[in-house]
Amino acid sequence: MKKILYILLALFIVGSLFSYNYYQKIFGTAITKDYTLFIHSDDSLLDIKKELESVSKSPETFLWVAAKKSFATPKPGRYVLKEGMSNNDLVNMLRSGRQTPFKLSFNNQDTLEKFAGRIAEQVETDSISLLTAFKDKTFLKENNLNEKSVLQIFIPNTYEFYWTVSPEKFRNKMLIAYKRFWTKSREAKAAKLNLTKSEVITLASIVQKETAKKSERPIVAGLYLNRLRKGMPLQADPTIIYCVKEVKGQDYVVKRVLTVDLKINSPYNTYLNKGLPPTLIAMPDISAIDGVLNAQKHNYYYMCVNVDKLGYHAFARTLSQHNRNAAKYHQWLNKQKINR
């Protein structure tokens, strides 16, 4: 009887150890620290196992549990793993595709191509696919846009997305955000200025490029509005730099606008053409847009760089005042040997 009892006890102990080990593999702690796991569309379980090596007690056990639960095809996504998660929790998360959204942000970008590149750095899709979605002819036609004006629907801010968002869903969500941006208050201010939404964005893009000082943007916007109301050409140097880059390439550096540049034959040349250019020249941020909508009322019609306070502008009501300011600025450029 004693031998039988010992045998039974031994079997019980072995069975208990086996059960405990079995339980631990499935339900015990597997993840040793918080970790963000990115699974690409072509990743296999072996790829995931390799990725888990730095945060899992036993990556091989993950594969064992996955096999037990008949899990073979992971869903791509961005998954936030928490310390203390079990392999069972992990497999259930990956099988269900329960990924965690993240905060995507971007600042103002000069071109649609640069914007697509900035977004591609943060999501799974590539910049070419994003550009294709942005330039889709049906989408552009339905929203009264073109390949240049579509840049205006992307308002620099922070948004919530899934890492696997498709180019089309990203584009459509940004369009929704753009429409929400135009509150009744902003629409009323645009109407009071006699400007459409697109015109506000276009003017804001010039203001954006004209000054980096947010406090100065309402003043600059007011100056351009004064010129528009009086029928004067804007004579905005940022539009000339835009024209030069259209000819020379986006990476071409322009530190000084030359007289010859003012003769470039382009609808974006605001020295040759009155009114606003056809579309925005860059992506303005919210401060530039609101700077236009809340433009300061004053009698300034001219401005140039303030050499006594670099980063700011010297404003003038008359051409003679402006010429004095401009002469001072040109002398400073020559002294700095800035020829282009």
Image (cartoon, rainbow, N blue to C red):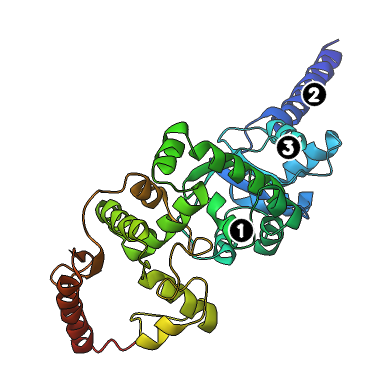
Could you tell me which quadrant the N terminus lies in? top right
Q: For the residues carrying marks 3 and 1, which lies nearer the camera in this image?
A: 1
Q: For the residues carrying marks 3 and 2, which lies nearer the camera in this image?
A: 3
Q: Which mark is residue 15?
A: 2
| Quarter of the view holding residue 129 | bottom right
Sequence-wise first label, 3 or 1? 3
Q: Is residue 49 visible?
A: no
Where does residue 284 sit, x and y in percent of width and height? 44, 55
Where does residue 6 sit, x and y in percent of width and height? 80, 17
Q: Residue at x 21, y 52 (%)?
A: 298
The residue indicated by pointer 1 is: 120
| Quarter of the view holding residue 3 | top right
CA–CA distance in space, label 3 to label 2: 35 Å
The residue indicated by pointer 3 is: 97
Q: Is residue 229 visible?
A: yes
Q: Residue at x 53, y 36 (%)?
A: 180
Mark 3 falls on what kind of element?
loop
Q: Residue at x 80, y 39 (%)?
A: 66
Where does residue 340 sit, x and y in percent of width and height? 35, 86
Q: Which kind of residue does numbered mark 2 sit on? A: Gly
